[in-house]
Image (spheres, rainbow, N blue to C red):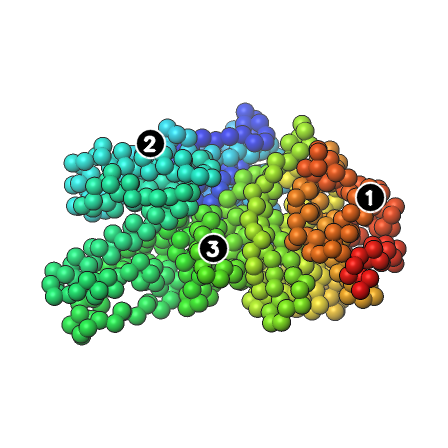
Amino acid sequence: MAPGFVEPTLKVLMGDPETAKLFLVAAPGAVGKSTYANALASATQAVVVDLARTPPLGGNFFTGGLSNAFGISALADAATGKTALIVDALDEAQMRAGPQGYEAGLLDLAAITETTDALPAVLLGRAIAAEEAYLYLGSNGFDACLLEIQFFSEDQAKAYIEGKLPIVAGRDPSLASAYATHTQTFRDLAHAARKKLIAAAGCDQSRFSGYAPVLDAICEFTLGADSHNPKAKLAELNSTSPIELIHDIITSILLREQGKLRAQFSEHHPDATESVLNALYTPDAQLGHVAATLFEAQAPPPPPLPNGVFQATYQEMVERFAPEHPFLSSARVASNPVFAAHLVAWALRRSDHAEVARKAVLARPTMMSGIFFELYERAMLGAEHPLMPLADVGILYQALNSQIVPGQRVQLEIMGQENGAAGPAALEVSFEILERIDPETGEAPAGQTWGPFASTADTLLELRSPFSNIYIDAPIHVQLGDGIVQQIAAPAAFSVEGLMLSAKQVLVVSGNPDGSTDIPAVSLIAAEASCESVQTVTVKDASLTVSWPGAKAHPWNSYAVDVVPAADENVDFMRRRLRNILTAFRSHSKGALRRLAAKIDHSRMIKDERGAALRERLLTDKILVSVQSGKFYELDPDIMGRILCMNYHDLAQCRYTPELDSYLYDVLLGTQTWAT
């Protein structure tokens, strides 16, 4: 086993581990899947296949790969149990390969394990990729088991810290000496920092205190104490939340680096004033140099200094210090996902770094951890005028997706504010983690929510494959795809100004993790669209509706519908309110369409008195029913169909009827807005 390795705990989610020949191991991003894969291979003499470094998956990928790498006898060795495979980076393989190649590769691997004597294969990936692979293999008759890597327990986290500290200390001889002399003091500081993290307000203990990147950051902070008293260092932390503690840890590391350069500069120039020393290698300057390395961007200019000698000394020191920064392990590689997340959050909030940071993250989505979302939120809310650029929303959506476990889904809502304001359209952006429905009660726990955040339509929203549970009703421009394939997992509904699809193939599938028999819908509506690169559209276990000029041409013609324009802007407003309200309901395992009442009653959903009147009319007509003492609303699709003359999917796909418009007119007649 590698030094400092702590074996994680696995939880069986689905399948029988006693009989399975294929083990799908899921975990949030940066939790240690690759480290676990290598440790498991070392202990079992298995062969690791890292799909992030191989050509895209396809038929004969594994059988051909074994033969090419180890000779034709390798296939016989696999069949007789002499060779086992551990396959890492399922999520990256899913993104890089088209659906047919990806699925063919999975079946090729499964076929290798079919013989009686063959050893099981282990596949590792993030939650959605592992879950979908498990379901696909099971549907094709293969015996699979889905497991989840748990966050470290209390004992595991302590062991991880105590194993990691000497590794971090070993990077520097002076640190190694200090650690050897004061081992227990440093351990006490690290464990105390972790305890404070657990006790901090709003802390999810497993999510933070048992998350390997956070434990790594605690170790970096602990051994960054230098000449400071470790206990005094801990006392300086005034964190009120886990993210504040992480921020304090990172800030401490940056200030330590600044202090090291200041001390050396003072030795060269004893006449340097305090104001000069304070301007050297500031935290922002350090982050700028790290960003230049990771993103291949331009390095920040030096601060204005009194003379050329000072300038030359500072430049020479930066050239030595910057490549060895603790946030870097090598050129273009961050030493820790938390550090990378902090850097990207910092860069996206600065106009001179934002664009290059976005490109880097879109090109390398696994470069940072899910903690990025919280770090970004902290940076944004600390701004004088907090505004979330639309260009950042897709990155934030992917960051939340890297946090979830099997059964959870991330929901994104972008709504236009109908306030008639001049300039770029005002938007509201909200995120939510939807929880798995309890099969015994039919209830889903309330998920964690963020927002609404203010945004504007003056930048482009970019989304990559795969995504699901995205609802957009706003005059924005959206770009989908990476040039090869775009997978959309239903449900999803877009009503936008412009839609650009950069993919040869579009695949629409069901994204329901609860096994519901309902057919979920995807609706793509745009005033204009650029989809010339799309050659094929495949729909599986879902429905698809599209509407834009030219949508009735191949390959969209089978899914194209006409959206009948509203008679006036008031009816159009009411259509949008009705659609947003009713399509917000989620299908539960007992057949009910349910949503938290607070979500429906929120001003973001209702907007004004017209929306409030519509909600009350829906309750009066029993289309919506208040249940559980008003905590939830339930949607009755039968009453909805009888009164509105359209079903749930018709509404999701904007198939408006004259009967519906008449109903909305009737609601409008009772409002003050309509009367005036």
Residue at mark 3: 381
Quarter holding the N terminus? Answer: top left
Q: Which of 598 and 255 lies nearest the eye of the viewer?
A: 598
Tag 2 residue: 159
Cα separation, mark 2 vs mark 1, equals 60 Å
- Identify the residue shown where x is 61% and y is 48%: 411
> In the rendered structure, which amino acid carries the disc numbered 2?
Ala
Helix, strand or loop status at disc 2: helix
| Residue lying at 20% horizontally and 39% vertically, measured from the top left | 179
Residue 192, horizontal then vertical, whole percent: 31, 35
Mark seen at residue 620: 1
Decide which of tag 3 and tag 1 comes sooner along the chain. 3
The percent position of residue 109, horizontal first and vertical second, equals 54, 41
- 260 on left or right of 203: left
Q: Secondary structure at mark 3?
A: helix
- Residue found at x 41% / y 42%: 240
Looking at the picture, how far across and down is residue 346, in whole percent? 41, 58
Q: Nearer the viewer, mark 3 or mark 2?
A: 3
Looking at the image, residue 675 lies above or below residue 508: below
Q: Position of residue 552 (x, y in %)?
A: 77, 65
Left or right of 123 on screen, residue 609: right
Q: Is residue 263 left or right of residue 123?
A: left
Q: Are marks 3 and 1 in contact (CB under 8 Å)?
A: no
Residue extending farthest bottom: 308
Q: Amino acid at mark 1?
A: Thr
Distance in Å between CA atoms under marks 3 and 1: 40 Å
Disc assigned to residue 588: none
**Above/below status of 593 relative to 326:** above
Q: Quadrant of residue 161?
A: top left
Which quadrant would the C terminus be assigned to in this image? bottom right
